[in-house]
Amino acid sequence: MRAPRHGSMRAHVALAFAALVLAGDALQPALAGGCGFDYKDALSKTIIFLEAQRSGKLPRSNRVKWRGDSGLDDGKLANVDLTGGYYDAGDNVKYGLPLAFTVTTLAWTALAFKPELESTKELKHVHQAIKWGTDYLLKCAARKNKLWVQVGDPNLDHQCWVRPENMKAPRTLYEIDSKTPGTEIAAETSAAFAASSMVFRDDKKYSRKLLNKAKLLFTFAKSHLGSYDGECPFYCSYSGYNDELLWAATWLYLATRRQVYADFIAHEAISSSVAEFSWDLKFPGAQVLLAEFNMTSAGGAQNFKSQADNFVCAVLPDTAFHQVFITPGGVIHLRDGANSQYVTSTAFLLVVYADLLLRTGQTVLCGNQPLPPARLHEFARQQMDYLLGANPRHSSYVVGFGANPPTQPHHRGASTPVLPPGTDVNCGLSFGDWMAPDKPNPNELTGAIVGGPDKNDGFVDKRGNSSYTEPCTYINSLAIGPLAALAVRGVQLVATQ
């Protein structure tokens, strides 16, 4: 069973579009990593994992050959088509909030690391991953002031250890509307559409469709305020909806440059300095995006550059404002339960922010202590290297990569043998047959970054140890950018001087 909730509130753009796309001649050739990691291989495999999470009718180009079509009747209970999208982790439910966040962060990756992804020939695969998500989300948002936010009852789903291709539990549908609002999910889906509209600008019709949906959903989100708790206890919004509103407005401003969104950011949005960037807490992401514009919120009382600095100061261990726990082996640890998501999200933000600081000739200020962009790059590399094997266990946390990688990720599809379509699985026996055995999964979940170690760098590679062995789409979506930068720029992560 998947661990409840992978993030919570703890602790109390702007990259202009042209700046997001760095000049190709600014890139440095890759250098041999200090630990000898093949970053390009890690990058490729990290993207492949997302194909293992696809729901719906799979294309012939799908590279995970042990996966098949699934969820082909999704939506039929309400006479709508809700096929497609992603399973978030190791079960067979499609949750709207983490799915939309996965798409938003994939789109940001495609924008911020476009030259690196082009150089590694992975940009096409990232675009495909984004579109697999946006095509599904467009179906969810087909009607105004209504959004389908979940397919599948997690409690029923967790009563059977079965591949999605053979699941037989009812595909229960969940929605938000004007009477049952869900500001967080509506705003996050708006952000996903707005960010993706920038990625697909060469396809004007599709880009316009995404942007129009982003605008409608943002209006819906802020006009019908209220948290939706239907995804609890698995994806409860502990941080509230103010971060998603700021996040969505930020992406809409970047996509449109319309004053209405700048005004919302400056006068209506609420921002806060925190030490976490996750599917539940988006403040640092918006602050990094808005830092370059010298924008403020709360009528000028809060400066986004200062708040982005505060995030860095809270994370890095060599500042007086450090808040985040660092394991003896050197990786950040916010909490058990998919802790790797905080590792990849922090690495992502630090690389993006350091690139911005280099372009604008600035540093991070932690009180009176300046930190150069190189320090952010260095810490980001250390975090990614830890996941790849530079840790006390000398073991990889990426399935199919490096030394002693995980072989028992908590994942129904990977741990269950491929069965003929229509096979009637005995749910009562399924856990004993396929979840409990202490042996490698029959299907390699290539590229999956598992939940990671505990606060003492300990890790037991057992399927039932879900807090540490379960992968999630948003762990990988935020790993792609840093890995692409490492693959192309080398261990110093410098794109511009």
Image (cartoon, rainbow, N blue to C red):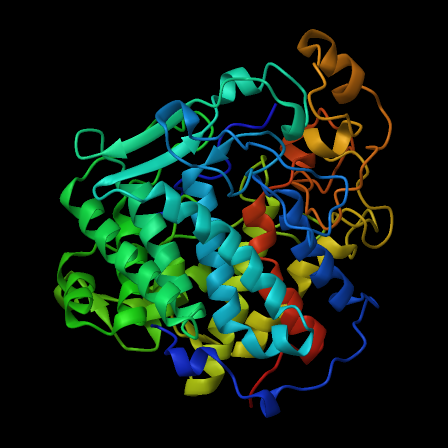
Q: Residue at x 57, y 28 (%)?
A: 3
The residue lying at 25 percent from left, 49 percent from top is 217
Is residue 260 visible in this depiction of the protein? yes
Q: Position of residue 371 (x, y in %)?
A: 50, 75
Measuring 74% from the left and 60% from the top, which residue is drawn there? 42
- Seen as rendered, the residue at the extreme top is 428
Residue drawn at point x = 70 percent, y = 27 percent: 465
**How many numbered marks, from 0 up?**
0
The C terminus: image quadrant:
bottom right
Q: Is residue 265 left or right of residue 151?
A: left
Which quadrant does the N terminus fall into? top right
Looking at the image, residue 73 sits to the left or right of residue 26; the answer is: left
Q: Position of residue 15 (x, y in %)?
A: 39, 75
Query: Considering depth in this image, is 221 or 452 the residue closer to the camera?
Result: 221
Rendering coords of residue 306 (x, y %): 33, 69
> For residue 468, which quarter of the picture?
top right
Q: Is residue 400 left or right of residue 213?
A: right
Q: Is residue 252 left or right of residue 109?
A: left
Q: Position of residue 231 (x, y in %)?
A: 40, 29
Residue closest to the eye, 392 or 64: 64
User: Would residue 366 be visible to someone looking at this image?
Assistant: no
